[in-house]
């Protein structure tokens, strides 16, 4: 029973892991934000002016990585390239096995990756500069 369940749904490991990493990142970001606010509060309680770097961190919100708009754009470009390459790879895989019973999942993944590549391209071209 357990072996059949794992055999049929092994692929769910990847989205569950991705969701777990997303939750971990959100919790980590929240902890960082709370620490920055507590530090600013301690400066204000002492009657001191908080350092400008600390105020800058608080103003940036969730982006503590210090990435500039240019590096964000490079990141968006890599997202597009990655999704486009995966779409091309799965399309090639579908092309080679198109006569088999298991060809349809290759086509589904290729279309999804293609849509994600187009979305990443739109975000890259029309997003914040």
Image (cartoon, helix red, strand yellow):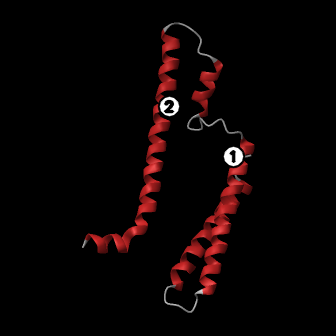
Q: Is the residue marked by circle 1 packed among few (<14), some (14-19), or many (20+) residues within 10 Å?
A: some
Q: Name the image quarter holding the N terminus.
A: bottom left
Please tell me whether residue 48 is drawn above or below residue 33 in the rendered image. above
Sequence-wise first label, 1 or 2: 2
Q: Is residue 33 left or right of residue 12?
A: right
Q: Check residue 72 in the rendering and tell me which mark sits there, or answer none.
A: 1
- Left or right, 65 with reference to 105: right
Q: Position of residue 35 (x, y in %)?
A: 48, 25
Q: Is residue 40 left or right of residue 8?
A: right
Which type of secondary structure does the marked residue at label 2 adopt? helix
Residue 129 location, x and y as percent? 74, 46
Toward the bottom, the furthest residue is 99
Residue 90 lies, in percent from the top left, at 61, 75
Seen at 44% across and 39% down, the residue is 27
Distance from the alpha carbon under mark 1 to that under mark 2: 21 Å
Whole-percent x and y of residue 116? 61, 65
Residue 32, label in figure: 2
Q: Secondary structure at mark 1?
A: helix
């Amino acid at each position: 029973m357990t072996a059949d369940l794992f055999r049929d749904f092994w692929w769910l490991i990847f989205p569950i892991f991705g969701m777990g990493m997303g939750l971990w990142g959100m919790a980590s970001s929240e902890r960082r934000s709370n620490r920055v606010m507590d530090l600013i509060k301690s400066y204000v309680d002492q009657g001191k002016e908080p350092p400008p770097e600390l105020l800058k961190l608080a103003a940036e919100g969730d982006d503590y990585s210090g990435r500039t708009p240019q590096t964000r754009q490079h990141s968006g470009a890599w997202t597009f390239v990655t999704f486009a390459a995966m779409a091309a790879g799965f399309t090639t895989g579908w092309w080679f096995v198109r006569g088999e019973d298991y060809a349809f999942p290759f086509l589904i993944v290729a279309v999804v990756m293609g849509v994600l590549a187009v979305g990443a391209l739109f975000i890259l071209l029309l997003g914040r500069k």
